[in-house]
């Protein structure tokens, strides 16, 4: 059984292409090697899971048997977030980004976009919540803030997201690559709408998939598109009513489709079916 939370080969390909220390002549060979590994695993696995429908189609397109592929979405502990009160209207719009300080999260584009937003919108603040994965990249982000003279931006480091959510009006995610981001689901559970890049299943989370009639819970833009990101954040800043409406849509969607209990039930059934298929007991030993 293979549980794939992103598309492994796509993520490795992006890393290899962007790695300056990898010889250009060697990159195609290394990428082909990872695709070969995935193809072999896809063909040998009895069941293959993904987080959303588009990822399943990508797996099938890369050689996975369609009848082996199954979607099991992420789930979050809804009760931890659903009772967080909305931030009182204090004349400021507070934006949160729950991200690791790493290149794949593209914090630099977020900083540029917020700088542009601040030139057009008064009383807006950005809170970047998360630890440092890449110290060199983090230092470059801190330096960029200084170079641009960005005001009202805070790097909080690691925080209790449940508690900090009380201070936020909406959240933003600027990743270059994602699967099904938990930060978006948690923001929705707290009735905070989102602005995201169009990566992974962010579009589906914002707009819903087939059979989901809840509505739209935010805006998405292409990755690394700072002007579009700035405009989307400006649109979200323009109306508290809009934010509250979209936030409630997001909360309803998470409650219906992305609860932790539902995810666990789906995996328990999958493990049980796999054990039965191969005659194993609960400890992975032959019966």
Image (tube, rainbow, N blue to C red):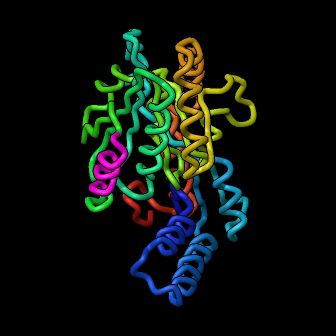
What is the x, y in percent for residue 102? 37, 56
How far across and how far down the image is residue 120, in percent? 51, 28
Against 88, residue 3 (above or below) is below
In front here: 176 or 11? 176
Q: Residue furthest bottom?
A: 25
Residue 192 shown left or right of residue 55 in the figure: left
Check the picture and name the quadrant holding the C terminus.
Answer: bottom left
Looking at the image, residue 69 lies above or below residue 122: below
Asked whether the viewer can see residue 106, the reply is yes
Residue at image location 58% in from the left, 31% down from the top: 257
Side of 173 relative to 157 (left or right): right
Q: Position of residue 82 (x, y in %)?
A: 43, 19
Residue at figure coordinates x 68%, y 24% from the top left? 215
Q: Residue at x 44, y 57 (%)?
A: 104
Q: Residue at x 41, y 49 (%)?
A: 107
The residue range painted magenta reads 138-149
Q: Quadrant of residue 93?
A: top left
In this view, 80 is above or below 55: above
Extreme-top residue of the structure = 89
Q: Is residue 5 above or below residue 237?
A: below
Q: Main secondary structure of the magenta part?
A: helix
Indicate the quadrant where residue 86 lies: top left
Compare residues 45 and 24 and report the one nearer the observer: 24
Q: In x, y percent, where is residue 138? A: 30, 54
Does 188 appear in magenta? no
């Amino acid at each position: 059984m293979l549980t794939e939370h992103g598309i492994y080969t796509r993520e490795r390909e992006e890393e290899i292409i962007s790695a300056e220390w990898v010889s250009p002549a060697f990159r195609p060979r290394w990428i082909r090697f990872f695709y070969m590994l995935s193809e072999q695993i896809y063909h040998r696995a009895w069941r293959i899971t993904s987080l959303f429908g588009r990822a399943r189609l990508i797996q099938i397109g890369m050689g996975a048997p369609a009848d082996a592929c199954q979607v099991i979405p992420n789930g979050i502990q809804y009760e931890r977030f659903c009772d967080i009160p909305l931030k009182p209207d204090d004349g400021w719009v507070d934006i949160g980004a729950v991200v690791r300080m790493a290149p794949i999260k593209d914090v630099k584009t977020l900083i540029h976009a917020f700088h542009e937003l601040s030139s057009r919108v008064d009383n807006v603040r950005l809170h970047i919540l998360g630890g440092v994965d890449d110290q060199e990249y983090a230092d470059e982000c801190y330096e960029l803030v200084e170079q641009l003279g960005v005001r009202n931006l805070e790097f909080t480091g690691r925080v209790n997201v449940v508690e900090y959510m009380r201070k936020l009006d909406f959240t933003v995610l600027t990743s270059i690559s994602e699967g099904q981001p938990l930060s978006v689901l948690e923001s929705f559970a707290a009735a905070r709408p989102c602005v995201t890049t169009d990566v992974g299943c962010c579009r589906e989370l914002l707009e819903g998939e087939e059979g989901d009639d809840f509505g739209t819970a935010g805006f998405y833009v292409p990755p690394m598109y700072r002007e579009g990101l700035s405009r989307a954040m400006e649109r979200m800043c323009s109306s508290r009513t809009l934010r509250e409406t979209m936030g409630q849509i997001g909360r309803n969607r998470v409650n219906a489709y992305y609860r932790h209990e539902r995810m666990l039930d789906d995996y328990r059934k999958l493990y049980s079916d796999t054990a039965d298929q191969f005659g194993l007991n609960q400890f992975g030993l032959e019966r």
